Amino acid sequence: MSFEMPPPNTPEEGVAAPTISSRADARRIFGSGVPSTIYDSPASSPDGSRLSSVADYGPYQVPSRGHTHDQSEYGIDYQALDYAQQIDEALLCPICHTPFFMPMTTKTCGHTFCASCLDRALETQHVCPIDRRPLDINRDISQTRTRVILDQLDRLKVKCPNSGCDHVCSRELLYAHVERYCEQTPVRCPDHHCDEMICRKDARLENGCLHYVTPCPYCEMAITFNDLERHYDQECTGQEAECPHCDAVLVRHRLAKHIATDCREVETHCKFQSAGCKQVARRKDIEEHLKNGCIYEAIANLMQAREEDHKIINELKGRLDALDGRTRHLERYGGGGAGSSGVRESSAFTRAAPPSSGLTADALNNLNRMQSATSGYADIDEANHNITLDDLFETFDQENNHQNDSNYSSPQAAAAAMAADAPPAPWAHNSGDGPWESPEDYMLSQFEAMEAKIEDLRKMMVELDGRHTMRLVNDTMRMNEQIAELGSKVGVLGMHTTWLMSMQRQSRGQQNSSGSTPGTTRSNISAGGGGSGGGNGGTGGNNEEGRGRTNTAAAGASGSSRTATQTQQGSRNGDAESARGRYLNTTDIPPLRRSSVGRGENPPRL
Amino acid sequence: MGDIQNSAPTFGARKNIDPSQNAVKRLQTELMQLMTSPAPGVSAFPSADGNLLSWRATIEGPEDTPYAGLTFKLTFEFPANYPYAPPTVLFRTPIYHPNVDFSGRICLDILKDKWTAAYNTQTVLLSLQSLLGEPNNASPLNGEAAELWDKDPTLFKTKVMDRHRDIDDD
């Protein structure tokens, strides 16, 4: 090998370790409330400087390097875990080839590694292990924060690392399992004179210290008591027992288990026995039998499916029973919104729907009738109030009667009701020993039912109100349109009048052109035209139609006239534009042309 | 590294005591990967003595190279801090190649200073396989071979065939 490894425990780790252990202490002090997942932990160590990427991950127990004894008490090497599921290759660290633990991502090239893997890789070379880009441990790497990845990692199913424990859980829960629940976790010996560790299941005060040396009952080897089990499995050679069925030789202690599950010579049933296979043979023959295809295997699948179905059916049954109980309870005490009167068995429960829907339908019909009868919106509103209360009482009575009639229409319902020992009639009809504990209770339930119905009616009214508003808006819109149309027509008429008057004026002006007519005559006429036009166009909100059309000579003569200030051309343009812009009936507008108006030729097309 | 780790008592939850444990774990996953999705032309397996830190591997000579049709055996010795340090790889089959000397040592950058922890046995084998077809003649261990590679391919081929001989597994 041509390059040298740096000394294994570099200063980096040495400094990082206290940080970790102080966090572990903090966790111990504050109890187990600290989340077992790392991801709520701050990104950097408390003193603000980051010395090692591992230091980012506080609450996890950091495995292996530079740990103290305390810290390793439940230290889990997450990279040595066995996973109970197939793992997506994208979740594997390229260095340790196990699912990421405390993943770190490089900022420069985006590659992800376990924190400890990356740390160790960077001890030798300060480059990314994938693409050899230079990396600065303090600057260029950061904790992976992509939740999709972290959640996937947290959810991985993992086996408990303690030997003898078969527990499988998601990885984020593993620490809690090992720390608090796993029976195989080594804990301190209950005898505080003893420094040894012992499995939690054996660490009982009444057991005392089990770290006393005892001879193995089979091989005479001196061994501590708590280590015996492991000793039987791994080392013990003494007092071996021969299996009565096969040639296997094993410790006497293990014989029973061997015969039950392992011995290939012992007679056993086919594993499809439950499906009907009668085959009984030695285990190795059974294996052969299975390999050749047990004919019951096909059925076994069916049986399995059937069993699953059974399971589902039973579960559903249980749920049905629970619901049944709940229904009964609800009926007995209070009745809720739907239970308006009396006791109803669950089979009769659905009958609650028709009467109440009948009620709503009735109320709706009444409201509709009122609506068509009255024209004003306010009236309807008032009428609604009147009708609801009357109607309510009326339908209540109807419903009660209906209920009493129909309650025992089916024999099952009757039987069920008898079984439940509950008389069908409400308290009012069966005074005394009804399901209601007192008249007050009954009244209360009735009251609640009424409240529910009132609530229903209120909702209906709100809906009706909405519909009304819509209709009103629709109607007024149409009317508005019509008014606007009328306005436009009036405006057009006004325009024609003005035009005719100006024609008249012009012709008169031509007649008088030889004589010296005073300007006041013209201005009077034009002012009159303006007035009439303004009056006509009032509904349309347009004054321009009313503006007198005077020639320039008239404009000069009538200084006082409002209309005269406008030139002939300007006013005409204004007329045409406003008429076209405001009213859709542009065909009604006479085509006015400057020259024709000015000369009095070409009368407008009306 | 290790006295600190070894001070912890050996219990089930602590499998990280032995520093080579991580290397073994990683080699196990690599072995699994090689078994389940083998790359064509290369194979590797732990040596018979049950030591996972020592492997035997074979490479088939690539087509269109002087090594076509030949099979080469190699040994891999993994350090305890693998994969943070590269394995030591040797050709056990005698090979005539510009970057391999007569005792089987290999001059390949990724086995030396260019090693990164992201490499694994399979990638190393594939790199070696491509090295057979594309030797790095700029830094030869076998100068004669480097010269002949360019000048006289026919003679090179003859030398390759002369040098090659199948060896038995031990």
Image: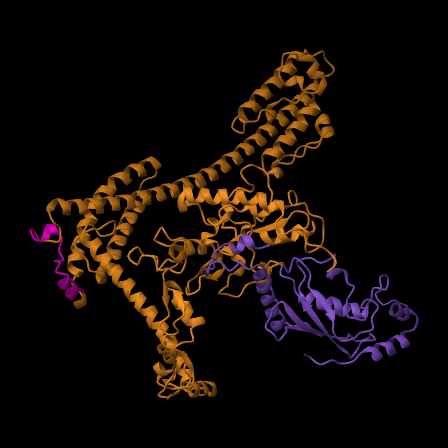
The x and y percentages for residue A486 are 52, 34
* Residue projecting furthest to the right: B151
Position of the C terminus of chain A, as image quadrant, is: top right
Does residue A149 appear in the picture of this structure? no
Q: Is residue B96 visible?
A: yes
Residue in the image at 49% along x and 42% along y: A22
Read off the magenta span: A413-433
Locate residue A337, reporting x and y percent.
25, 49
Number of numbered tags placed on the structure image: 0
Percent of width and height locating residue A480? 48, 36
Report if residue A432 lies within the magenta region: yes
Queried whether the magenta region covers residue A541, the answer comes back as no
Q: Is residue A535 left or right of residue A186?
A: right
**What residue sits 35% from the left and 78% below the top?**
A256
Residue located at (34% from left, 53% from top): A191
Q: Is residue A371 above or below residue A284?
A: above
The picture's colour for chain A is: orange
A348 with respect to A255 (left or right): left
Task: Give the color scheme: rainbow, by chain, secondary structure or one colour.
Answer: by chain
In the displayed structure image, the side of residue A30 where residue A384 appears, left or right: left
Residue A209 x/y as whole percent: 34, 57
The purple-coloured chain is labelled B
> Foreground residue, A83 or A209?
A209
User: Which residue sits furthest left?
Assistant: A432
Quarter of the image containing the N terminus of chain A?
A: bottom right
Q: Nearer the viewer, residue A522 or A142?
A: A142
Between residue A197 and residue A376, name the one nearer to us.
A197
